[in-house]
Amino acid sequence: MYRKVVVPLDGSELAEGVLPHVAELIRGRDSRVYLLSVAPTLRGVMSPIADLHPGNEERQRIEQKLEEYLGDVAQRLEPVAAEVGVNVRFGRPADEIIAFAEGVDADLIAMTTHGRSGIRRWIFGSVADRVLRGAACPVLLVRAASEPPRTTYQRILVPLDGSELAEQILPHVKALIQPRRTRLFLISVLTTGLGDRTVTLLTSYPPGLQLSTTALHYAESELQRYLRSVAAVLRDQGAIVHTTVRQGPPADEILAHAAEVEADLIGMTTHGLSGLSRWVYGNVAGKVLQGAHCPVLLIRPMSE
C-alpha cells in the first residue's frame, strides 16, 4: 500500500507542506512518487504561470520551468523514495490530477488543502474538492501550516458508523500501524439525526422519556460492542486501541475528540451507513475537513 503516490504541486510553499507527510508515509516502502504540476490553460484558474492556450514556444517555456522546479523538489524525496518522477500537464488542474492518478494506477494522492492563493476554500468548489469527488484512490489532505508538521501518525482517529462502507478505511489504517507505538482511537457518534422531532415528542411525557432513554442506551451498548470487536482485530496488528461512543452532531464530536486525543491523523471514508455521496459536501466529512487541525485521509468506498 502507498507504492505509487501522486503529489500535486503548484510552486508554492503552501502546497509543499505535504512533502514531509509523503516522506513519512513512503519511508521503507520502496515507493514511487509522482510529482505533478498542472498549468491551467483557461484564464482565471489558479496558476498565473499559464494563460489561455499558450502557443508552442510559450508552452515549452512553461513546461521547462515547471520541470526544473519539480526536479529541485524531487531531491528532497529521493532519500526515502525508490524513484521520483517529474510530470507536467496542461489543462484543468483537478481533471488532470485525476486522469494522471488513474493512468499510473496510483494508490494515494497527497496534497495540501490550499496552494498558491492560500485560500481556505480550496477544499470547497475548487481543485481539492473536485479531486475528492473524482479520484478512485485515497486522498490525503494536509492543511498548510507555518509550524513544522507532526508526521509520525502515532495517534490516529478513525470514525466508524457500523457499516461496511465506513470500515473500508481500516486496511489503510492497518498499513500505518507501528507495533506497540501506534495508538488508534475508534469513535462512533450516536445521533438521532432526522428523528430529533420524534425524540422530542417521545420525551414530552414520562412513558416516552423512559422509551427513548432505553432505546438510546441500547444503541450506545451496541456501538460499544461493535467498536470492541473492531479494536480486537487491530490489536492483533500491534496497535494500542481506544474506543469511545459519543452523542451529538457527528462532525463536531469527531473534531472535539481529535483535539482531546491530539490526533496526528483522521482516517475515514467519504460516506458510511447512508451511502450518500453528499456526505463529503456540507455534511460530516466536509465539516471534518474544514475543521481538522491534523491531516485527513479520505477514501471513497466501493459500494456494498
Image: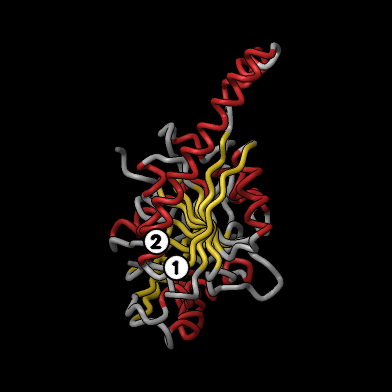
Left or right for 156, reference 276: right
Q: Position of residue 74 (x, y in %)?
A: 46, 81
Q: Residue at x 41, y 45 (%)?
A: 166
> Which image quarter holds the C terminus?
top left
Look at the numbered discs 2 and 1 and tell me whether their residues touch, using CB distance below 8 Å. yes
Q: Residue at x 53, y 69 (%)?
A: 153
> Upstream in the sequence, badge 2 or badge 1?
2
> Which image quarter holds the N terminus?
bottom left
Label 2: which residue? 234
Colouring scheme, one of rainbow, by chain, secondary structure, one colour: secondary structure
Amino acid carrying mark 1 in the image: Ala
Front residue of 184/109: it is 184
Q: Quadrant of residue 46?
A: bottom right
* Gap in angstroms between the C-alphas marked 2 and 1: 6 Å
Count residues near mark 2 (Cα–Cα under 10 Å), then give few for <14, some for 14-19, many for 20+.
some
Front residue of 48/291: it is 291
- Image height of 220 relative to 187, above or below: above
Front residue of 205/189: it is 205
Residue 215 appears in the figure:
yes
Give the SS element for disc 2.
Answer: helix
Label 1: which residue? 239
- Image height of 287 relative to 240, above or below: above
The circle on residue 97 is none
Q: Residue at x 47, y 63 (%)?
A: 110
